[in-house]
Image: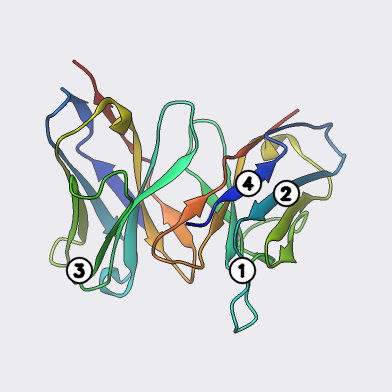
Amino acid sequence: DIVLTQSPLSLPVTPGEPASISCKSSQSLLHSNGNNYLAWYLQRAGQSPHLLIYFASSRASGVPDRFSGSGSGTDFTLKIDRVEAEDVGIYYCMQTLHTPMFTFGQGTKLEI
Amino acid sequence: EVQLVESGGGLVKPGGSLRLSCVASGFSFNIYMLTWVRQAPGKGLEWVSSISTTGTNTFYSDSVKGRFTISRDSAKNSLDLQMTSLRAEDTAVYYCARVGSWNLDYWGQGTVVTVAS
C-alpha cells in the first residue's frame, strides 16, 4: 500500500507571505506515460474537500494561480505564493496512481 | 451544475446497519466511477469504496471489506452504501465523490454516521 506523509502538519502563516507543504510517497507516483498521479485538496472548516491540483502540477478549474504544485516520483510540494485569508484550512495530498483506490496524506492545517 | 447530495446518515448501535445514498445531477451519471470517502471526527480523509461505471466492479478498503456494499442505480442516478456490522470506528462524515480524470473532482456535502450505544 502507498503511504503519503505530509509535512508540516501545522503551518502558521502571515497573509501575503508564501507557504509550502510537502508530500512524500512510499512508492513512486510517476507513470510510464510521464504523469505523476498526485492531487492536492483544500478542506475549509465545515466544508467538503475541493480539488486544487491534479497530475502533481495542473491547476483545477477556477483555482487561483497563486497555487502551484511541483515534484515527481516520490516527492511533491504545494506552494502558495502569497497566502490570503481564504486559504485557511486543511490541505491533503492524495495518490491517484491506484485509481479507483485512493490514499490520502494526514493533512496539513494552514492557519493565520 | 454538478451536484452530489448524500442522505441516510444517523445514529446506530454497534452491530447495526445503515444505508447511505447519494443522488447525482448535472452530469452524465453512467460514464463516471463514483466513490465514498469518510472522515472521522477531527481526523483526516479515508477512502472507503469505489464502483465502476456499470457497477460490475467494486472496490473496498480493508477496514470495511466484508461489511460494506457499494452499488449504483442508473435509473435513479444514485449511489448507495449499505453498511452492516457497524463499529464505533465507523463513526464519520461520509462523502460521495465523482471520480474524474484520475482525481475526485466533485464532492457532496457529506452525511454524518454515528455508531454508539
Q: Position of residue A13 (x, y in %)?
A: 80, 32
Same subunit, tags 2 and 4: yes
Q: Which residue is mark 4?
A: A5
Task: Looking at this view, name the residue that lies furthest to the top.
Answer: B117
Q: Position of residue A59 (x, y in %)?
A: 66, 64
- Disc 2 versus disc 3: distance between alpha carbons? 36 Å
Q: Which residue is mark 3?
A: B55
Residue A57 as seen in the image, left or right of residue A19: left
Vertical placement of residue A45 versus A82, above or below: above
Nearer mark to the viewer, of 2 and 4: 4
Type of the residue with mark 3? Gly
Q: Position of residue A54 (x, y in %)?
A: 60, 64
Does label 2 or label 1 sit earlier along the sequence?
2
Q: Residue at x 76, y 39 (%)?
A: A84
Nearer mark to the viewer, of 3 and 4: 4
- Disc 2 versus disc 1: distance between alpha carbons? 15 Å
- Disc 1 versus disc 3: distance between alpha carbons? 26 Å
